[in-house]
Amino acid sequence: MNAVPAMAPDEESASPFTVLVVEDQDSVRAALVGELHHAGVSDVLQAANGNMALHLFRSRRPDLVLLDIKLPGNDGYWVAQQMRVAESGDWTPIIFLSGLDGDLDVWRGIEAGGDDYLVKPVKPIVLVAKLRAMRRLLDMRRRLVAMTEELHQANQRLNEMVEVDALTGLVNRRGLDRILHSEIMAARRDGTPLTLMLCDLDHFKLYNDAIGHLQGDVCLREIGRLLSEVCVRPRDVAARYGGEEFVLILPNTPRSGAMTFARALGQLLRVRAITHPNSPLGNALTLSGGITTCVPDDNTSAESMLMRADQALYAAKTQGRDRFFSFEMQMDTVAQRRS
């Protein structure tokens, strides 16, 4: 082989570049390694057979493979196929090396997973041209992957922004619909109970009339913080349903656990003792809630669960407010406190 011309500085990539040379003839392999070093490739891996090549490919993940077709044992076609299986979605350029140059040989190489084909003896100027081309392709792919990841993260941040209630910082109605649908699907798949609570601040219009809407917003933010505090498990979600209505999504929560949660929430609100200057129920802010719990089936939907919780909320209000009610348990938190 004649010496390969070294790459010009503007053609060299700043990122590391590793080449795996798979060639059973020691002299040919040594010549290829020398030419690659001269071309500016500092990290060159060597393998004399398919098994060694696969081990190096899996452990070192080279950026380019120069693969001889005729190898002891399994041939290069088989090795290329195994390399493609091991990639799991990644892509490593594979250039076949062979003394054969028939159309069928080229076709077999491409079908086996190869990207290019060089006929031995390889001309140095052709080798460096292929090396430069593959390096440019890899650099372009890396930039594309980086841009795709940046775009994915930006979309995630955007989705988070559009699913957050600006006033309370809780999940908004759009996020609620998406999360509730997802949790229904998960509970249906796993056969686990799902609880939904719809809460309404009692006589909140009177609160705004007495203190003003600005102070009402301060109160809603305080309620948002309180609901966030009670959602201690990773998948528990507090959402603002609209106005002074809030929703709690509690995965893997049975009926008894739901009522226990409701009593604790009511007690926490009483401890906070947020002043309500014009409430018929006393001088502190209270809330009412409707609870529905089920193991979702094919007929369960976000709309049906919200409707059921809304019906239970209405029942809680008609029974005097400042309580939670569940049709499934046919009891409310006030009744439980008295029992």
Image: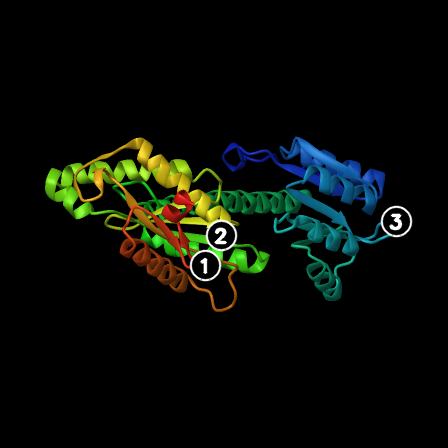
Q: Quadrant of residue 319?
A: bottom left
Relative depth, front residue between 22 and 243: 243
**Badge 1 or badge 3: first in the primary sequence:** 3
**Badge 3 or badge 2: first in the primary sequence:** 3
SS at mark 2? helix
Q: CA distance from mark 3 to mark 2?
A: 67 Å
At 81% across and 41% down in the image, what residue appears?
52
Circles 2 and 1 in contact, beta carbons < 8 Å? yes
Q: Is residue 7 above or below residue 67?
A: above
Q: CA distance from mark 2 to mark 1?
A: 8 Å
Residue 72: mark: 3
**Position of residue 143 measured from the top left corner of the image (x, y, whole percent):** 48, 43
Relative depth, front residue between 58 and 271: 271
Q: Is residue 163 above or below residue 62?
A: below
At 85% across and 42% down in the image, what residue appears?
25
| Marker count (numbered) | 3
Crowding at mark 1 (Cα within 10 Å: few <14, some 14-19, many 20+): few
Q: CA distance from mark 1 to mark 3?
A: 72 Å
Q: Residue furthest front?
A: 339
At 71% across and 46% down in the image, what residue appears?
66
**Position of residue 165 measured from the top left corner of the image (x, y, whole percent):** 29, 45
**Position of residue 230 measured from the top left corner of the image (x, y, whole percent):** 41, 38
Write down the residue under mark 2. 255
> In the image, what residue type sits under mark 3?
Pro
Write down the residue under mark 1. 328
SS at mark 1? loop
**Position of residue 38 measured from the top left corner of the image (x, y, whole percent):** 66, 32
